[in-house]
Image (cartoon, rainbow, N blue to C red):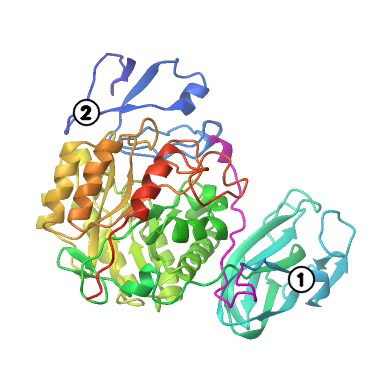
Protein backbone atom coordinates (compact mmCIF):
# COMPACT_ATOMS: atom_id res chain seq x y z
CA UNK A 1 0.00 0.00 0.00
CA UNK A 2 1.33 3.47 -0.84
CA UNK A 3 1.79 5.80 2.09
CA UNK A 4 1.43 9.49 2.65
CA UNK A 5 3.67 10.65 5.49
CA UNK A 6 3.01 13.99 7.12
CA UNK A 7 5.94 14.98 9.37
CA UNK A 8 5.65 17.74 11.95
CA UNK A 9 7.11 20.34 9.62
CA UNK A 10 4.47 19.66 6.97
CA UNK A 11 6.85 18.00 4.52
CA UNK A 12 6.13 14.70 2.79
CA UNK A 13 8.32 11.63 2.94
CA UNK A 14 7.86 7.89 2.71
CA UNK A 15 8.45 5.48 5.53
CA UNK A 16 7.08 2.99 7.99
CA UNK A 17 6.81 2.68 11.72
CA UNK A 18 5.52 0.49 14.48
CA UNK A 19 8.34 0.27 16.97
CA UNK A 20 7.89 1.49 20.50
CA UNK A 21 9.26 4.95 21.11
CA UNK A 22 8.47 6.36 17.67
CA UNK A 23 5.93 9.11 17.31
CA UNK A 24 4.83 8.29 13.75
CA UNK A 25 1.49 6.55 13.57
CA UNK A 26 -0.35 4.90 10.68
CA UNK A 27 -3.99 5.89 10.48
CA UNK A 28 -6.54 4.64 7.99
CA UNK A 29 -9.41 7.14 7.92
CA UNK A 30 -12.17 6.28 5.51
CA UNK A 31 -14.10 9.36 6.63
CA UNK A 32 -11.37 11.59 5.15
CA UNK A 33 -11.39 9.46 2.02
CA UNK A 34 -15.12 10.08 1.73
CA UNK A 35 -14.42 13.80 1.66
CA UNK A 36 -11.94 13.41 -1.17
CA UNK A 37 -8.97 14.20 1.05
CA UNK A 38 -7.32 10.81 0.68
CA UNK A 39 -6.92 9.06 -2.69
CA UNK A 40 -7.96 5.39 -2.92
CA UNK A 41 -5.26 3.01 -1.74
CA UNK A 42 -3.40 5.61 0.31
CA UNK A 43 -3.00 5.85 4.05
CA UNK A 44 -2.34 8.95 6.09
CA UNK A 45 0.61 8.83 8.45
CA UNK A 46 0.44 11.54 11.08
CA UNK A 47 2.81 12.82 13.71
CA UNK A 48 0.38 12.79 16.61
CA UNK A 49 1.22 12.38 20.23
CA UNK A 50 -2.28 12.90 21.58
CA UNK A 51 -5.28 10.80 20.66
CA UNK A 52 -8.62 12.34 19.81
CA UNK A 53 -11.82 10.83 18.60
CA UNK A 54 -12.62 12.13 15.14
CA UNK A 55 -16.08 13.34 14.35
CA UNK A 56 -17.91 12.00 11.38
CA UNK A 57 -17.06 13.78 8.08
CA UNK A 58 -19.96 16.21 8.29
CA UNK A 59 -18.97 17.26 11.82
CA UNK A 60 -15.19 17.54 11.50
CA UNK A 61 -13.87 20.85 12.79
CA UNK A 62 -10.73 22.89 12.52
CA UNK A 63 -8.16 21.75 15.03
CA UNK A 64 -9.15 18.08 15.03
CA UNK A 65 -6.10 15.84 15.02
CA UNK A 66 -5.64 12.16 14.40
CA UNK A 67 -4.51 9.90 17.14
CA UNK A 68 -2.63 6.73 17.98
CA UNK A 69 -3.07 3.97 18.95
CA UNK A 70 -6.80 3.75 18.17
CA UNK A 71 -9.48 6.00 16.77
CA UNK A 72 -13.07 5.64 17.81
CA UNK A 73 -15.36 7.04 15.14
CA UNK A 74 -19.11 7.20 15.28
CA UNK A 75 -21.03 5.36 12.60
CA UNK A 76 -21.70 7.64 9.62
CA UNK A 77 -25.28 6.37 9.59
CA UNK A 78 -25.60 7.24 13.27
CA UNK A 79 -24.29 10.81 13.09
CA UNK A 80 -26.69 13.12 14.84
CA UNK A 81 -28.87 10.26 16.05
CA UNK A 82 -30.80 11.16 19.17
CA UNK A 83 -30.62 8.87 22.16
CA UNK A 84 -33.58 6.54 21.69
CA UNK A 85 -35.81 5.02 24.32
CA UNK A 86 -34.35 2.28 26.48
CA UNK A 87 -36.49 -0.62 27.51
CA UNK A 88 -35.59 -1.38 31.10
CA UNK A 89 -36.88 -4.69 32.46
CA UNK A 90 -39.26 -4.61 35.41
CA UNK A 91 -38.35 -7.34 37.85
CA UNK A 92 -41.92 -8.43 38.33
CA UNK A 93 -43.83 -11.68 38.28
CA UNK A 94 -44.41 -13.06 34.77
CA UNK A 95 -47.85 -13.60 33.35
CA UNK A 96 -49.69 -16.85 33.87
CA UNK A 97 -47.95 -18.36 30.86
CA UNK A 98 -44.49 -17.35 32.08
CA UNK A 99 -43.92 -15.51 28.79
CA UNK A 100 -42.58 -11.96 28.55
CA UNK A 101 -45.19 -9.26 29.05
CA UNK A 102 -45.56 -6.29 26.74
CA UNK A 103 -45.04 -2.70 27.91
CA UNK A 104 -48.24 -1.13 29.21
CA UNK A 105 -49.32 2.23 27.75
CA UNK A 106 -51.00 4.81 29.98
CA UNK A 107 -52.52 7.67 28.00
CA UNK A 108 -51.93 11.19 29.27
CA UNK A 109 -55.44 12.42 28.44
CA UNK A 110 -56.83 9.80 30.86
CA UNK A 111 -54.47 10.72 33.71
CA UNK A 112 -54.86 13.31 36.46
CA UNK A 113 -53.60 16.73 35.43
CA UNK A 114 -53.08 20.17 36.93
CA UNK A 115 -52.98 23.32 34.80
CA UNK A 116 -53.20 21.53 31.49
CA UNK A 117 -55.84 20.35 29.04
CA UNK A 118 -56.56 17.28 26.91
CA UNK A 119 -56.45 18.21 23.24
CA UNK A 120 -56.36 16.46 19.85
CA UNK A 121 -55.45 19.19 17.34
CA UNK A 122 -51.97 17.86 16.48
CA UNK A 123 -51.81 14.60 14.53
CA UNK A 124 -49.73 11.56 15.41
CA UNK A 125 -50.88 10.93 18.97
CA UNK A 126 -52.04 7.60 20.35
CA UNK A 127 -55.32 7.10 22.17
CA UNK A 128 -57.81 9.96 21.93
CA UNK A 129 -55.42 12.88 22.35
CA UNK A 130 -52.63 14.35 24.43
CA UNK A 131 -52.11 16.85 27.26
CA UNK A 132 -51.13 20.42 26.48
CA UNK A 133 -49.46 21.84 29.60
CA UNK A 134 -50.26 25.40 30.62
CA UNK A 135 -47.24 27.69 30.19
CA UNK A 136 -46.43 27.78 33.87
CA UNK A 137 -44.01 26.10 36.23
CA UNK A 138 -45.68 23.41 38.32
CA UNK A 139 -48.18 22.16 35.74
CA UNK A 140 -48.20 18.37 35.70
CA UNK A 141 -49.69 15.07 34.54
CA UNK A 142 -49.92 12.19 37.03
CA UNK A 143 -50.57 8.51 36.33
CA UNK A 144 -51.43 5.68 38.70
CA UNK A 145 -49.51 2.53 37.75
CA UNK A 146 -49.95 -0.90 39.32
CA UNK A 147 -47.02 -3.31 39.64
CA UNK A 148 -47.37 -7.00 40.46
CA UNK A 149 -44.31 -6.81 42.71
CA UNK A 150 -41.48 -4.44 43.57
CA UNK A 151 -38.82 -3.98 40.92
CA UNK A 152 -37.15 -1.71 38.40
CA UNK A 153 -39.19 -0.55 35.42
CA UNK A 154 -38.52 1.36 32.21
CA UNK A 155 -40.62 4.47 31.85
CA UNK A 156 -41.07 5.98 28.41
CA UNK A 157 -42.65 9.43 27.96
CA UNK A 158 -43.87 10.16 24.43
CA UNK A 159 -44.01 13.87 23.73
CA UNK A 160 -43.87 16.63 21.12
CA UNK A 161 -42.24 20.04 21.46
CA UNK A 162 -42.79 22.32 18.49
CA UNK A 163 -40.55 25.04 19.89
CA UNK A 164 -36.78 25.30 19.72
CA UNK A 165 -36.48 25.54 23.50
CA UNK A 166 -36.04 22.78 26.05
CA UNK A 167 -39.14 22.34 28.22
CA UNK A 168 -37.69 20.41 31.18
CA UNK A 169 -39.76 18.39 33.62
CA UNK A 170 -39.07 16.62 36.89
CA UNK A 171 -40.29 13.03 37.05
CA UNK A 172 -41.32 11.74 40.46
CA UNK A 173 -42.35 8.25 41.51
CA UNK A 174 -44.34 8.02 44.71
CA UNK A 175 -43.25 11.55 45.57
CA UNK A 176 -39.52 10.99 45.05
CA UNK A 177 -37.71 12.61 42.13
CA UNK A 178 -36.11 10.03 39.84
CA UNK A 179 -35.12 12.59 37.17
CA UNK A 180 -34.79 16.27 38.00
CA UNK A 181 -35.20 18.83 35.22
CA UNK A 182 -35.07 16.11 32.60
CA UNK A 183 -34.69 17.63 29.14
CA UNK A 184 -37.56 17.61 26.65
CA UNK A 185 -35.98 19.34 23.69
CA UNK A 186 -37.66 20.50 20.51
CA UNK A 187 -38.87 17.74 18.19
CA UNK A 188 -39.19 19.91 15.09
CA UNK A 189 -42.95 20.40 15.15
CA UNK A 190 -46.02 19.70 17.28
CA UNK A 191 -46.80 16.68 15.09
CA UNK A 192 -43.33 15.15 15.46
CA UNK A 193 -43.39 12.82 18.45
CA UNK A 194 -40.40 11.49 20.32
CA UNK A 195 -39.88 9.24 23.34
CA UNK A 196 -37.56 9.88 26.24
CA UNK A 197 -36.87 7.21 28.82
CA UNK A 198 -35.61 6.54 32.32
CA UNK A 199 -35.74 3.76 34.87
CA UNK A 200 -37.44 3.82 38.24
CA UNK A 201 -38.07 1.50 41.15
CA UNK A 202 -41.74 0.68 41.60
CA UNK A 203 -43.28 -0.83 44.70
CA UNK A 204 -45.77 -3.67 44.65
CA UNK A 205 -49.28 -2.36 44.09
CA UNK A 206 -50.23 1.20 43.19
CA UNK A 207 -47.60 3.80 42.23
CA UNK A 208 -48.00 7.45 41.27
CA UNK A 209 -45.81 8.78 38.48
CA UNK A 210 -45.86 12.54 37.91
CA UNK A 211 -44.24 14.69 35.18
CA UNK A 212 -44.04 18.30 36.39
CA UNK A 213 -42.96 21.31 34.31
CA UNK A 214 -40.15 23.25 35.96
CA UNK A 215 -40.03 26.47 33.90
CA UNK A 216 -42.45 29.20 32.94
CA UNK A 217 -42.71 27.69 29.46
CA UNK A 218 -44.56 24.70 30.89
CA UNK A 219 -44.04 21.17 29.68
CA UNK A 220 -44.16 19.70 26.17
CA UNK A 221 -47.32 18.11 24.82
CA UNK A 222 -47.38 14.65 26.46
CA UNK A 223 -48.99 11.76 24.61
CA UNK A 224 -48.54 8.78 26.92
CA UNK A 225 -46.43 6.93 29.48
CA UNK A 226 -45.24 3.38 28.85
CA UNK A 227 -44.15 1.01 31.62
CA UNK A 228 -42.08 -1.95 30.46
CA UNK A 229 -42.87 -5.11 32.43
CA UNK A 230 -39.86 -6.79 30.88
CA UNK A 231 -39.15 -10.49 30.93
CA UNK A 232 -39.22 -13.22 33.52
CA UNK A 233 -36.65 -12.37 36.22
CA UNK A 234 -33.67 -14.69 36.58
CA UNK A 235 -33.81 -17.51 39.11
CA UNK A 236 -31.99 -16.35 42.27
CA UNK A 237 -28.47 -17.73 42.61
CA UNK A 238 -28.06 -18.54 38.91
CA UNK A 239 -26.68 -15.25 37.56
CA UNK A 240 -23.07 -14.02 37.80
CA UNK A 241 -23.98 -11.65 40.62
CA UNK A 242 -26.25 -14.19 42.27
CA UNK A 243 -23.42 -16.71 42.41
CA UNK A 244 -20.46 -14.47 43.21
CA UNK A 245 -21.99 -11.62 45.20
CA UNK A 246 -19.94 -8.50 45.79
CA UNK A 247 -16.45 -8.75 44.30
CA UNK A 248 -13.30 -7.44 45.95
CA UNK A 249 -9.65 -7.17 44.99
CA UNK A 250 -7.53 -9.79 46.76
CA UNK A 251 -3.83 -9.53 46.00
CA UNK A 252 -3.55 -9.31 42.21
CA UNK A 253 -6.91 -11.02 41.59
CA UNK A 254 -10.61 -10.23 41.63
CA UNK A 255 -12.32 -12.46 44.19
CA UNK A 256 -15.93 -13.40 44.88
CA UNK A 257 -17.83 -13.62 48.16
CA UNK A 258 -16.14 -16.96 48.86
CA UNK A 259 -12.66 -15.48 48.48
CA UNK A 260 -12.07 -17.33 45.21
CA UNK A 261 -10.44 -15.63 42.18
CA UNK A 262 -12.87 -15.16 39.29
CA UNK A 263 -12.68 -13.96 35.71
CA UNK A 264 -15.55 -11.89 34.28
CA UNK A 265 -16.19 -11.83 30.53
CA UNK A 266 -18.52 -9.42 28.78
CA UNK A 267 -19.08 -6.51 26.43
CA UNK A 268 -18.64 -2.76 26.38
CA UNK A 269 -21.29 -0.52 24.90
CA UNK A 270 -20.35 2.02 22.27
CA UNK A 271 -20.96 5.67 23.16
CA UNK A 272 -24.47 5.92 24.57
CA UNK A 273 -24.97 9.28 22.84
CA UNK A 274 -24.87 7.44 19.49
CA UNK A 275 -25.91 3.84 20.09
CA UNK A 276 -28.52 3.78 22.86
CA UNK A 277 -30.82 2.17 20.27
CA UNK A 278 -28.62 -0.95 20.54
CA UNK A 279 -29.30 -1.22 24.27
CA UNK A 280 -32.86 -2.48 24.55
CA UNK A 281 -34.53 -5.02 26.76
CA UNK A 282 -34.19 -7.54 23.93
CA UNK A 283 -30.52 -6.92 23.20
CA UNK A 284 -29.51 -7.08 26.86
CA UNK A 285 -31.65 -10.17 27.40
CA UNK A 286 -29.59 -11.73 24.61
CA UNK A 287 -26.33 -10.56 26.17
CA UNK A 288 -27.26 -12.00 29.57
CA UNK A 289 -29.05 -15.18 28.51
CA UNK A 290 -27.83 -16.10 25.01
CA UNK A 291 -24.24 -14.86 25.28
CA UNK A 292 -24.08 -15.72 29.03
CA UNK A 293 -22.15 -12.50 29.67
CA UNK A 294 -21.02 -11.69 33.20
CA UNK A 295 -20.49 -7.95 32.83
CA UNK A 296 -21.65 -4.91 30.85
CA UNK A 297 -19.42 -1.85 30.50
CA UNK A 298 -21.52 1.32 30.13
CA UNK A 299 -19.50 3.92 28.21
CA UNK A 300 -20.50 7.49 28.99
CA UNK A 301 -18.41 9.73 26.75
CA UNK A 302 -17.52 13.02 28.38
CA UNK A 303 -16.91 15.05 25.23
CA UNK A 304 -18.10 14.35 21.64
CA UNK A 305 -21.75 15.32 22.25
CA UNK A 306 -21.69 13.27 25.44
CA UNK A 307 -21.94 14.11 29.13
CA UNK A 308 -20.73 17.69 28.94
CA UNK A 309 -23.53 18.54 26.47
CA UNK A 310 -26.30 17.45 28.89
CA UNK A 311 -25.07 16.08 32.23
CA UNK A 312 -28.51 15.17 33.54
CA UNK A 313 -29.52 13.27 30.41
CA UNK A 314 -26.39 11.15 30.34
CA UNK A 315 -26.44 10.55 34.08
CA UNK A 316 -30.04 9.33 33.75
CA UNK A 317 -29.01 7.15 30.82
CA UNK A 318 -26.22 5.57 32.86
CA UNK A 319 -28.67 5.02 35.73
CA UNK A 320 -31.05 3.25 33.34
CA UNK A 321 -28.42 0.91 31.95
CA UNK A 322 -27.14 0.08 35.42
CA UNK A 323 -30.64 -0.86 36.49
CA UNK A 324 -31.16 -2.89 33.33
CA UNK A 325 -27.97 -4.91 33.81
CA UNK A 326 -28.74 -5.35 37.51
CA UNK A 327 -32.18 -6.77 36.71
CA UNK A 328 -30.42 -9.41 34.58
CA UNK A 329 -27.87 -10.36 37.22
CA UNK A 330 -24.83 -8.90 35.44
CA UNK A 331 -22.00 -6.81 36.82
CA UNK A 332 -21.73 -3.23 35.53
CA UNK A 333 -18.65 -1.12 34.80
CA UNK A 334 -19.55 2.57 34.91
CA UNK A 335 -17.06 3.92 32.36
CA UNK A 336 -16.13 7.62 32.41
CA UNK A 337 -15.10 7.62 28.77
CA UNK A 338 -12.63 10.49 28.54
CA UNK A 339 -10.47 10.66 25.40
CA UNK A 340 -9.64 14.22 24.43
CA UNK A 341 -8.28 16.12 26.28
CA UNK A 342 -6.08 13.23 27.36
CA UNK A 343 -5.44 14.68 30.82
CA UNK A 344 -8.26 13.38 33.07
CA UNK A 345 -7.78 16.37 35.36
CA UNK A 346 -9.43 18.52 32.67
CA UNK A 347 -12.73 16.83 33.53
CA UNK A 348 -12.09 16.51 37.27
CA UNK A 349 -15.06 18.61 38.38
CA UNK A 350 -17.42 16.87 35.96
CA UNK A 351 -16.15 13.46 37.11
CA UNK A 352 -16.78 14.34 40.76
CA UNK A 353 -20.36 15.36 39.94
CA UNK A 354 -21.04 12.29 37.82
CA UNK A 355 -19.60 9.71 40.18
CA UNK A 356 -21.25 11.34 43.19
CA UNK A 357 -24.62 10.91 41.48
CA UNK A 358 -23.89 7.33 40.40
CA UNK A 359 -22.66 6.29 43.84
CA UNK A 360 -25.59 7.94 45.60
CA UNK A 361 -28.12 6.00 43.49
CA UNK A 362 -26.37 2.61 43.38
CA UNK A 363 -24.31 2.36 46.59
CA UNK A 364 -26.40 -0.54 47.90
CA UNK A 365 -25.79 -2.71 44.84
CA UNK A 366 -23.25 -5.53 44.80
CA UNK A 367 -22.48 -5.40 41.07
CA UNK A 368 -20.88 -1.98 40.44
CA UNK A 369 -17.39 -1.10 39.22
CA UNK A 370 -16.33 2.53 38.81
CA UNK A 371 -13.96 3.07 35.85
CA UNK A 372 -12.79 6.60 36.52
CA UNK A 373 -10.76 7.46 33.39
CA UNK A 374 -11.03 5.51 30.15
CA UNK A 375 -7.80 6.32 28.28
CA UNK A 376 -5.46 9.01 29.62
CA UNK A 377 -2.90 10.17 27.07
CA UNK A 378 -0.19 12.78 26.66
CA UNK A 379 0.22 13.14 30.42
CA UNK A 380 2.54 11.66 33.01
CA UNK A 381 1.58 8.79 35.27
CA UNK A 382 1.97 11.22 38.18
CA UNK A 383 -0.86 13.36 36.76
CA UNK A 384 -3.10 10.32 36.27
CA UNK A 385 -2.30 9.10 39.78
CA UNK A 386 -3.12 12.51 41.24
CA UNK A 387 -6.49 12.49 39.47
CA UNK A 388 -7.29 9.01 40.80
CA UNK A 389 -6.41 10.02 44.34
CA UNK A 390 -8.89 12.91 44.11
CA UNK A 391 -11.77 10.96 42.53
CA UNK A 392 -11.60 7.75 44.57
CA UNK A 393 -12.38 9.48 47.91
CA UNK A 394 -15.47 11.07 46.31
CA UNK A 395 -16.76 7.61 45.46
CA UNK A 396 -15.64 6.02 48.74
CA UNK A 397 -17.44 8.66 50.80
CA UNK A 398 -20.72 7.24 49.47
CA UNK A 399 -19.89 3.73 48.29
CA UNK A 400 -16.98 2.40 50.35
CA UNK A 401 -16.99 -1.16 49.05
CA UNK A 402 -17.18 -1.22 45.22
CA UNK A 403 -13.98 -1.80 43.23
CA UNK A 404 -12.53 1.18 41.35
CA UNK A 405 -10.78 0.77 37.99
CA UNK A 406 -7.95 3.21 37.28
CA UNK A 407 -6.93 4.00 33.70
CA UNK A 408 -3.23 3.92 32.91
CA UNK A 409 -1.42 6.37 30.70
CA UNK A 410 -0.90 6.14 26.92
CA UNK A 411 -4.49 5.02 26.28
CA UNK A 412 -4.47 2.48 29.10
CA UNK A 413 -1.45 0.62 27.75
CA UNK A 414 0.67 0.91 30.92
CA UNK A 415 2.60 3.54 28.98
CA UNK A 416 3.71 1.26 26.13
CA UNK A 417 2.09 3.39 23.42
CA UNK A 418 4.17 6.35 24.61
CA UNK A 419 7.44 4.49 24.99
CA UNK A 420 7.21 3.38 28.64
CA UNK A 421 6.18 0.18 30.42
CA UNK A 422 4.33 -1.07 33.47
CA UNK A 423 7.12 -0.29 35.94
CA UNK A 424 5.94 3.30 36.47
CA UNK A 425 2.60 2.01 37.80
CA UNK A 426 4.06 -0.93 39.69
CA UNK A 427 6.59 1.33 41.43
CA UNK A 428 4.18 4.21 42.08
CA UNK A 429 0.77 2.73 42.80
CA UNK A 430 -2.33 4.77 43.59
CA UNK A 431 -2.81 5.33 47.30
CA UNK A 432 -6.09 3.46 47.65
CA UNK A 433 -7.32 -0.06 48.33
CA UNK A 434 -9.72 -2.31 46.40
CA UNK A 435 -8.61 -0.91 43.04
CA UNK A 436 -7.49 -2.40 39.74
CA UNK A 437 -5.59 -0.91 36.80
CA UNK A 438 -6.93 -1.03 33.26
CA UNK A 439 -5.24 -2.24 30.10
CA UNK A 440 -6.54 -1.94 26.52
CA UNK A 441 -5.32 -3.70 23.40
CA UNK A 442 -6.27 -4.19 19.75
CA UNK A 443 -4.71 -7.43 18.60
CA UNK A 444 -4.00 -6.61 14.95
CA UNK A 445 -1.95 -3.57 16.00
CA UNK A 446 -0.72 -4.45 19.49
CA UNK A 447 1.61 -7.41 19.32
CA UNK A 448 3.96 -9.29 21.64
CA UNK A 449 5.35 -6.20 23.35
CA UNK A 450 1.87 -5.33 24.62
CA UNK A 451 1.09 -8.97 25.45
CA UNK A 452 4.31 -9.30 27.45
CA UNK A 453 3.58 -6.06 29.29
CA UNK A 454 0.14 -7.30 30.30
CA UNK A 455 1.63 -10.58 31.51
CA UNK A 456 4.30 -8.90 33.64
CA UNK A 457 1.90 -6.31 35.05
CA UNK A 458 -0.71 -8.90 36.06
CA UNK A 459 1.91 -10.68 38.18
CA UNK A 460 2.51 -7.51 40.21
CA UNK A 461 -0.74 -5.53 40.33
CA UNK A 462 -4.50 -6.19 39.82
CA UNK A 463 -5.45 -5.69 36.15
CA UNK A 464 -8.83 -5.51 34.38
CA UNK A 465 -8.87 -5.38 30.55
CA UNK A 466 -11.89 -3.13 30.13
CA UNK A 467 -11.52 -2.76 26.37
CA UNK A 468 -10.02 -4.79 23.52
CA UNK A 469 -10.68 -5.76 19.93
CA UNK A 470 -9.57 -8.31 17.37
CA UNK A 471 -8.87 -5.56 14.82
CA UNK A 472 -6.48 -2.63 14.53
CA UNK A 473 -6.36 0.22 17.05
CA UNK A 474 -9.20 2.00 15.22
CA UNK A 475 -11.49 -0.95 15.91
CA UNK A 476 -11.72 -1.64 12.21
CA UNK A 477 -10.08 -3.64 9.45
CA UNK A 478 -9.22 -7.33 9.39
CA UNK A 479 -9.65 -9.52 12.47
CA UNK A 480 -6.57 -11.17 13.93
CA UNK A 481 -8.20 -13.98 15.86
CA UNK A 482 -4.94 -15.87 16.35
CA UNK A 483 -3.23 -12.99 18.17
CA UNK A 484 -6.40 -12.25 20.14
CA UNK A 485 -6.54 -15.85 21.28
CA UNK A 486 -3.03 -15.47 22.72
CA UNK A 487 -4.35 -12.62 24.84
CA UNK A 488 -7.44 -14.58 25.87
CA UNK A 489 -5.35 -17.59 26.86
CA UNK A 490 -3.13 -15.39 28.99
CA UNK A 491 -6.12 -13.67 30.62
CA UNK A 492 -7.79 -17.01 31.35
CA UNK A 493 -4.61 -18.39 32.91
CA UNK A 494 -4.13 -15.32 35.12
CA UNK A 495 -7.83 -14.69 35.86
CA UNK A 496 -7.81 -11.28 34.18
CA UNK A 497 -11.37 -10.09 33.57
CA UNK A 498 -12.30 -8.43 30.27
CA UNK A 499 -14.90 -6.63 28.19
CA UNK A 500 -14.80 -6.49 24.41
CA UNK A 501 -15.36 -3.37 22.28
CA UNK A 502 -18.24 -3.04 21.25
CA UNK A 503 -21.93 -3.98 21.55
CA UNK A 504 -23.35 -1.93 18.67
CA UNK A 505 -24.04 -2.01 14.93
CA UNK A 506 -21.43 0.60 13.99
CA UNK A 507 -20.20 -0.07 10.46
CA UNK A 508 -16.68 -0.95 11.63
CA UNK A 509 -15.61 -4.55 12.05
CA UNK A 510 -15.19 -4.13 15.80
CA UNK A 511 -18.93 -3.61 16.38
CA UNK A 512 -20.53 -7.02 16.87
CA UNK A 513 -23.84 -6.44 15.06
CA UNK A 514 -24.34 -5.98 11.34
CA UNK A 515 -25.36 -2.42 10.34
CA UNK A 516 -29.10 -1.87 10.65
CA UNK A 517 -29.61 -4.46 13.38
CA UNK A 518 -30.36 -1.88 16.07
CA UNK A 519 -32.69 0.21 13.92
CA UNK A 520 -34.59 -2.99 13.13
CA UNK A 521 -34.70 -3.99 16.82
CA UNK A 522 -32.79 -7.23 16.23
CA UNK A 523 -32.92 -10.13 15.95
CA UNK A 524 -30.61 -10.16 18.93
CA UNK A 525 -30.07 -13.80 19.88
CA UNK A 526 -28.04 -16.31 17.89
CA UNK A 527 -25.46 -15.42 15.26
CA UNK A 528 -27.58 -14.32 12.29
CA UNK A 529 -27.15 -10.60 13.02
CA UNK A 530 -23.48 -10.80 14.01
CA UNK A 531 -20.35 -9.83 12.10
CA UNK A 532 -17.42 -12.32 12.18
CA UNK A 533 -15.94 -10.64 15.26
CA UNK A 534 -19.33 -10.86 16.97
CA UNK A 535 -19.66 -14.57 16.26
CA UNK A 536 -16.12 -15.17 17.54
CA UNK A 537 -16.38 -13.15 20.74
CA UNK A 538 -19.86 -14.46 21.58
CA UNK A 539 -18.45 -17.98 21.50
CA UNK A 540 -15.64 -16.98 23.90
CA UNK A 541 -18.06 -15.34 26.32
CA UNK A 542 -20.39 -18.34 26.27
CA UNK A 543 -17.58 -20.72 27.23
CA UNK A 544 -16.42 -18.92 30.36
CA UNK A 545 -15.00 -20.91 33.25
CA UNK A 546 -17.34 -22.01 36.03
CA UNK A 547 -17.27 -19.74 39.08
CA UNK A 548 -15.71 -21.40 42.16
CA UNK A 549 -17.90 -21.38 45.26
CA UNK A 550 -16.08 -23.66 47.67
Q: Which residue is mark 2?
A: 18
Q: Percent x, y for residue 543?
A: 33, 54
Label 1 residue SS: loop
Residue 225 locus on image (x, y percent)? 71, 68
Estimate the spatial distance between the alpha carbons at disc 1 and disc 2, rounded to whole Å: 62 Å
Q: Which mark is residue 441?
A: none
Residue 177 appearing in the image: yes
Local SS, label 2? loop
Residue 367 visible within the image: no
Q: Residue at x 51, y 60 (%)?
A: 285
Taking the magenta stretch, the answer to whether it contains residue 94 is: yes
The answer to whether 546 appears left or right of 194 in the picture is: left
Q: Which residue is mark 1?
A: 136
Which residue is located at x 82 percent, y 54 percent?
124
For residue 458, side relative to residue 443 (left or right): left
Q: Quadrant of residue 438?
A: bottom left
Overall secondary structure of the magenta section: loop
Range shown magenta? 76-99
| Quadrant housing the C terminus | bottom left
* Quarter containing the N terminus: top left
Left or right of 327? Residue 416 is left
- Magenta-drawn stretch contains 274: no
The image quadrant that residue 357 belongs to is bottom left
How many other residues sit within 10 Å of disc 2, few (<14), some (14-19) or many (≥20)?
A: few
What residue sits 21% from the left and 28% below the top? 18
Q: Residue furthest right?
A: 121
Q: Position of residue 453 (x, y in %)?
A: 15, 45
Amino acid sequence: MSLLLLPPDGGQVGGQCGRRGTSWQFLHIHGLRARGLVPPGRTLLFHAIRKVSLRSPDRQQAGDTLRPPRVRLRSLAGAGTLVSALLIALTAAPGASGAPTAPVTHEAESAAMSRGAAESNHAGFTGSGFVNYDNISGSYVEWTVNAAQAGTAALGLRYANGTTSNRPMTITVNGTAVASNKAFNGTGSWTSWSTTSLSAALRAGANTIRATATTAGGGPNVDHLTVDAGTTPPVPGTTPVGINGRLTVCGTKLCNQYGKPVQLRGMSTHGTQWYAQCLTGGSLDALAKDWNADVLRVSTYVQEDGYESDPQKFTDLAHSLIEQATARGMYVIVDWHMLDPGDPNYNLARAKTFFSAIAARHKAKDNIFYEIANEPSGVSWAQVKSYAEQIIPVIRNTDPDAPVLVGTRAWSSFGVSEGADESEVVDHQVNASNIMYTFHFYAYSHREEYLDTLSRAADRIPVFVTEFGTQNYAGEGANDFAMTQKYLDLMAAKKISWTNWNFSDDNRSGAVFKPGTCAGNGPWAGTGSLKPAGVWIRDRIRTADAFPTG
